[in-house]
Image (cartoon, rainbow, N blue to C red):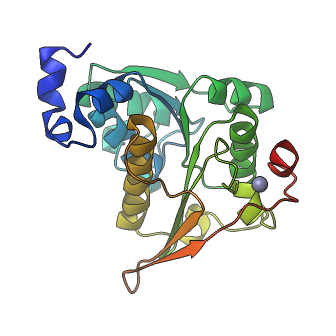
Amino acid sequence: MLTDQELLRYSRQILLQQVDIDGQLRLKNGRALIIGLGGLGAPVALYLAAAGVGELHLADFDTVDLTNLQRQIIHDTHSVGQTKVDSALQRLAGINPEITLVAHRAALDADSLAAAVTAVDVVLDCSDNFSTREAVNAASVAAGKPLVSGAAIRLEGQLSVFDPRRAESPCYHCLYGHGSDTELTCSEAGVVGPLVGVVGSLQALEALKLLAGFGEPLVGRLLLIDALTTRFRELRVKRDPGCSVCGVQHG
Ligand SMILES: [Zn+2]
């Protein structure tokens, strides 16, 4: 199932007993949906492509702007004005021609989002606003797909994994249901580039673990990253039995 070229390309992770050939095959058969190709989606897409995740589904309706380049490292100066999806497709095809890339260039409504989530094995929320995060979470819960959620603003980052296949797992809404779209985005509040790189890289790592089936995913835990002091903290997070998104299904 793996060609000689693939064995060579992925040899440094196949060397790990936790991955091995079986794990690499699971990655090859794995499908991931990346919502947003900005600061978080850039390292997510680069690392998942390089690692050999068989199908990457890329969703973004925005175009590359000069102000993106400080942190969205999948795009370059020549991509300015191009759609983020097309810019990312070129870069990813260059990194790994062995994988399949699926493009979602239009904004996803409830129906197309549900279809996009159903078509994959893991969802990565790399968006920058509350309403998208809520919609992606609801679709992931409804489809029973694990969601790797990351966020970064100014000098603070957050990361968690929500897995509706596990009865004890909270969903995004259990934690953040009180949020609102009045919260600032990076384009308004600012953010340092390496911080979104750290959070996005950790999202990619969590997705690889879920797809290949090794390690312990960040389920029921919220990782808080303080870039100013370089401190990582972890909070236990519980499912809210009264949650309007996941509470009915599992309650
Ligand atoms: Zn919930």
* Residue at 54%, 36% in the rendered image: 122
Closer to the camera in the image, 80 or 87: 87
Residue 227 location (% of width, % of height): 41, 78
Closer to the camera in the image, 242 or 178: 242
Query: What is the tally of numbered marks visible in this picture?
Result: 0
Quarter of the image containing the N terminus? Answer: top left
Closer to the camera in the image, 182 or 100: 100
Residue 201 location (% of width, % of height): 37, 54
Left/right of residue 167 with respect to residue 191 in the rendered view:
right
Q: Extreme bottom residue here?
A: 229
Above or below 241: residue 183: below
* Residue at 23%, 34% in the rendered image: 20
Left/right of residue 170 with respect to residue 219 in the rendered view:
right
* Residue at 56%, 65% in the rendered image: 221
Residue 58 location (% of width, % of height): 51, 31
Q: Ligand 1: give its quadrant.
A: bottom right
Left/right of residue 136 with respect to residue 24 in the rendered view:
right
The picture quadrant where one finds residue 123 is: top right
Above or below 21: residue 176: below
The picture quadrant where one finds residue 93 is: top left
* Residue at 29%, 27% in the rendered image: 22
Residue 170 location (% of width, % of height): 69, 57
| Residue 72 seen in this snapshot | no
